[in-house]
Image: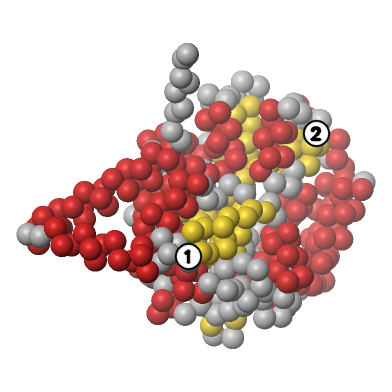
Amino acid sequence: METKKVTPSPCDLTVTAAQEFRRRTLLKAGVAAGTLAAAGPLSAPFVRAQGREVDVYVWNDYITEAMTDAFTEATGVRVNLSVYGTNNEVLNVLRASQGSGYDIVAPSVTTLQAWYDAGDLLQPIDESRVAVDHIVPSIWDRSLELGATRRGQRYAVPFNWGTEGIAFDSTQRDYAPGSTSWSDVWADQNMDLVTVRPRSALTVMGVMLDGTGEMMDEAHRDEEVARRVLDQALEFAIAHKGWIRQFWKDTPAIQNAFLQNGALVGICWDGPSLNLWRETDGRIKYLSPNEGALTWLDTLAIPSGAAHVDEAYEFINFITRPEMGAAHANHSGYNSAAQGASEYLTDDLKEKFNYAYNDGALIDNLYWWKPEPQWFQQLRQEYIERYEAA
């Protein structure tokens, strides 16, 4: 009987290499100490941790079994992993439970204002218990202005960042980094061939019609401006509704749009797009438009009713190690906020990153999602529903 060979994923390979490196390092340390007695203390944390667990609730393509197994091997803490597909989904679950049921969640930083407005759903982060040096300093600082703090206290630790740019079938479209615009998505040749997330499409249209993004920035602070910008975006969106092959709202829907429903172009997250690139042997590619891709930052936060707070901090500090950050990036296609993660990335992912951002030339143009007060989220939802129903 022939045994089928299973090819390890890039994430599995990264984690395995990191585990082997750690074993070799510990072995060398024991030898250097001149005693095998080191084996006792090394195993002690696992013995003390018997029966401990942590309940993690994150996006559906963020954490792999290889990553949770590595955490359990290192700490003895069992991971109970649950997944979701949208920010609203996790927020509604925590609202219903009044902040209980999970020890770790992963909200996008710009949505945290809605969490604050909903009550005490999250607990402040004790920075003395966080390995701050694990996080890229500029991202740690940037998270503050994007919404990670409330009343002078931090509520979230940066985990990863990513973009929404242009995914396309490279056998049908000749888009290239440095010479492609948002407006190319809405060219006549793409009628009935485009997939978008309604929320992102309206933002892209607002930025595109403005030309600078300054009015969209102001729209997050002033309701009158917001209505004016969204009115213009909605007018364009309805006029180009015939371009839409499929709306998407999560990773599986992006994959379905290109692999099953015949979409050729989309405004899509980078992670699923880069994985489609890999799965289709380069047929589907991804790039940032010249105006700058929409850019988000996701975080790790501890709900107010967390039952395993010690384990939650252990998980945060472990999953933000450079090798774990790279394991996440190699699996998901998103970018880790872990300092030094780039050293563990696969050559394949590095090559795709350089293509998507024109060898880094388009990084400075990135358009970061802005903190969203509740009134803005509610207003935008009205326009989304009008767009979908048009």
Any mark on residue 247, and which?
none
- Is residue 7 shown left or right of residue 257? left
Amino acid type indicated by mark 2: Arg
**Residue 196 at x, y percent in the picture:** 74, 43
Residue 79 vs 256, above or below: the answer is: below
Badge 2 or badge 1: first in the primary sequence: 1
Q: Nearer the viewer, residue 297 or 307?
A: 307
Let me know if residue 294 appears in the view.
Answer: no
Helix, strand or loop at label 2? It is strand
Helix, strand or loop at label 1? It is loop
Q: Quadrant of residue 111?
A: bottom right
Q: Quadrant of residue 147?
A: bottom right
How many C-alpha atoms fall within 10 Å of the one at disc 1: few (<14), some, or many (≥20)? Answer: few
**Residue 332 at x, y percent in the picture:** 53, 44
Residue 380 vs 325, above or below: the answer is: below
Q: Identify the residue at horizontal 27%, vertical 52% (top origin).
A: 22
**Residue 324 at x, y percent in the picture:** 41, 52
Residue 127 vs 134, above or below: the answer is: below
Any mark on residue 245, and which?
2
Q: Identify the residue at horizontal 59%, vertical 73% (top origin).
A: 306
Q: Which residue is mark 1?
A: 51
Residue 222 vs 207, above or below: the answer is: below
Single out the mark in the foreground, 2 or 1: 1
- Is residue 237 shown left or right of residue 68? right
Measure the C-alpha gap from mark 2 to mark 1.
Answer: 49 Å
**Residue 5 at x, y percent in the picture:** 44, 23
Q: Nearer the viewer, residue 329 or 384?
A: 329
How many C-alpha atoms fall within 10 Å of the one at disc 2: few (<14), some, or many (≥20)? Answer: many
Q: As drawn, which residue projects farthest toward the top?
A: 1
Amino acid type indicated by mark 1: Gly
Q: Identify the residue at horizontal 44%, vertical 42% (top origin).
A: 11
